[in-house]
Amino acid sequence: MARAMRTAEKVCAERDLQLTPIRRRVLELIWQRHAPIGAYDILGSLKKHEGALAPPTVYRALEFLLEAGLIHRIDALNAFVGCEMPDSEHAGQFLICRSCQSVTELEDASITQLIRKKALAAGFAPDAQEVEIKGICAQCRKRADA
Ligand SMILES: [Zn+2]
Ligand SMILES: [Zn+2]
């Protein structure tokens, strides 16, 4: 997590973005979890540790982190995960475990390019493409075999 925070600081400094205390705190909470975390859980944790915050403040912080590429939104889980490689522009493909809800990010530019190419060929102008792949993760599969 310390490494993730350092990367976030670096990315923000390079792009002239401000990692304000609340943005930093929300990002820390997302990394602490090691699993996708929803906005309500983030609000709950903040409330426990630093007193109630207005939900819009937290939503704005999430919006900022998303735009900066520091986190991703997993629509299927209505939750957020930290991005391991925010310093490279990417769309991301996510392996989502149905059993433990863990999320692993694949970053394969060739998949992104192929989807873009196919979409354009169909006359469609794609502007966002997070790919969510559902299944059972390696650890859960091992557990099932045992
Ligand atoms: Zn990512
Ligand atoms: Zn799993």
Image: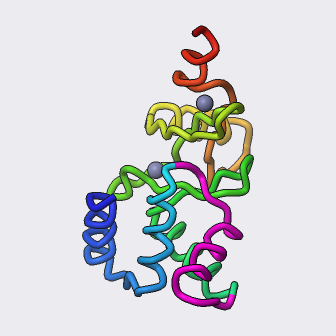
Examine the image and state in which quarter residue 145 appears.
top right
View extreme (top): residue: 145
34 left or right of 17 in image: right
140 left or right of 68 in image: right
Question: Who's the residue at 64% across and 36% down the image?
Answer: 100
| Residue 79 in picture, x, y percent from top left | 66, 57
Name above or below for residue 57 compared with residue 65.
Answer: below
Tell me, yes or no, whether the highlighted magenta stretch contains residue 39: yes
Query: If the image is split into quadrants, where does the C terminus sit?
Result: top right
Which residues lie in the magenta part? 35-54
Examine the image and state in which quarter residue 57 appears.
bottom right
Q: How many marks?
A: 0
Question: Who's the residue at 59% across and 23% down the image?
Answer: 140
Name above or below for residue 140 compared with residue 4.
Answer: above
| Residue 86 in picture, x, y percent from top left | 38, 57
Give the colour scheme shown: rainbow
Name above or below for residue 13 compared with residue 68.
Answer: below
50 left or right of 86 in image: right
| Residue 16 in picture, x, y percent from top left | 32, 82
Question: Who's the residue at 65% across and 76% down the image?
Answer: 43
Residue nearer the viewer, 10 or 101? 101
Tell me, yes or no, whether the highlighted magenta stretch contains residue 113: no
| Residue 56 in picture, x, y percent from top left | 68, 86
Q: Main secondary structure of the magenta part?
A: helix
Residue nearer the viewer, 55 or 95? 55
Query: If the image is split into quadrants, where does the N terminus sit?
Result: bottom left
24 left or right of 94 in image: left
